Amino acid sequence: MKIEPAAAIDGHIAVPGDKSLSHRAVLLSAVGEGETRISGFGRSEDTEATIAAVRDLGVRVYEADHETLRVFGNGLRGLTPPKKPIDCGNAGTLMRLLPGLLAGQEGTFELTGDDSLRSRPMERIAEPLRRMGAAVETTDGRAPLMVEGGTITPITYELPVASAQVKSAVLLAGLYGDGETTVEEPLPTRDHTENLLAQAGVAVRRQPHSVTISPPEALRLGEIEVPGDFSSAAPFIVAATLLAGSSLTVHGVNLNARRTGLLDVLERMGANITVFNRRRIAGEPAGDLDIRPSQLVGTTINAREVPLLVDELPLFALLAVHARGDSVLRGAAELRAKETDRIEAVVDGLRKLGAHIRATQDGFTIRGVPSRIRGGGAIDARGDHRIAMLGAITGLVSREGVDVEGAESAAVSFPGFYDLLDSLRGNTTS
Ligand code: S3P
């Protein structure tokens, strides 16, 4: 798909519900007591896989409308093994969180996924779940996975990687223990699981570097309203910052501080973003954003900040390409274990389009030039939704446009992405 350059983007938008929260809302309500009503559900290929998975496990999910689900929970131990493997599609969050719940069920469950998901590391969840008493088998460290529930022993687990998915798998298995389960995290990662568990009535104790839960009698969620996904807003925030003459307002977006590292980085780079209407949605901070264009300066991102904008790091590269001076990303080797090797995908993709970017083992370095990237070529999304959206925004802010190969993979997290982008176009410059 060819994305032509734009002079500016202009308008008011809302983006689909947060993907991390949408997965978690469905998974927790599947083992909840009675009905949970989820509004603002972020429909995408990934979250559809989660609905299908809990249905396969015997849970009734009624789709009241496009963004509203009614989930009739089977209770904490009420998931039953389907006859066929559970297909997680491309969804890493589903494949890494669901085994935490399956660890406490009776029976054996098989999980598989698409080529990308079957190439991603799964020992990181298998190892702690085994320690807790579940029998988990990987296929050379990857999916397909077999999970056999067992008697769960509570543990204190120190995360070897800063991963919210691994933290969540352990906490969810901890629901079935006979005592407290603690996860210690070296760096703060997104905390949606512990937030939702607390809302469901679980005793959650948080300390600066750890979270502890006590096993509950039952989960009671009632209603969950999902705020807009900051990660889906991010491509538009970047476009409005880079395109002179733009004016963009994003309404009702999640502003959980463990998700909005990009806003801090943008502020350091000199961006012009105002947050207003701060409020709470689903027990998390949310608000509206006003974005105006601005000249940027280069900056450095170190390991500590990485989990706070892990999914926005490809977009950071595009910002840095347009900033005055050098930018560096370090401590982000985890990007190599995402839907594709995102360091390689970003560096190869942007370099061919005119960027001065070089890969390092755990990040990249960029020499910024404060003028439009050339474009004029193609970027291969490699089946990765974040790379497809990076390619589209690169085309929009470029001089010659960009052909996004495999553009359809944006639907993994954001099915309406290209339509929304088109609706914001000012005059084209080509
Ligand atoms: C996610 C956590 C992050 C993120 C992913 C979604 C989640 O992964 O990259 O897109 O919902 O917990 P890691 O926790 O593996 O870094």
Image (tube, rainbow, N blue to C red):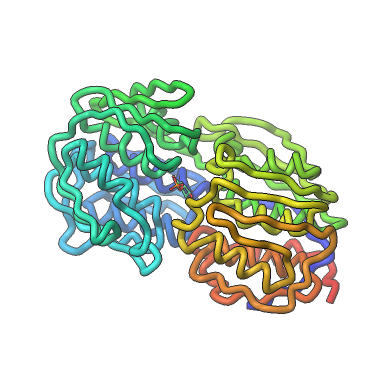
Residue 172 rendering spot, x and y as whole percentages: 30, 37
Q: Is residue 27 left or right of residue 414?
A: left
**Residue farthest toward the right in the current orientation of the protein:** 245
Quarter of the image for residue 77 reads top left
Q: How many marks?
A: 0
Q: Which of 269 and 78 is in front in this view?
A: 269
Q: Which of 374 and 180 is in front in this view?
A: 374
Q: Is residue 178 left or right of residue 366?
A: left
Residue 423 rendering spot, x and y as whole percentages: 72, 64
Residue 419 rendering spot, x and y as whole percentages: 64, 66
Whether residue 86 is visible? no
Q: Nearer the viewer, residue 411 or 293?
A: 293
Q: Is residue 236 left or right of residue 331?
A: right
Quarter of the image for residue 244 reads bottom right
Which residue is located at x 27 percent, y 23 percent?
A: 180
Which residue is located at x 35 percent, y 55 percent?
A: 121
Whether residue 381 is visible? yes
Which residue is located at x 81 percent, y 72 percent?
A: 399
**The N terminus sits in image quarter:** bottom right
**The C terminus sits in image quarter:** bottom right
Q: Nearer the viewer, residue 150 or 418?
A: 150
Which residue is located at x 38 percent, y 33 percent?
A: 222
Residue 140 rendering spot, x and y as whole percentages: 25, 60
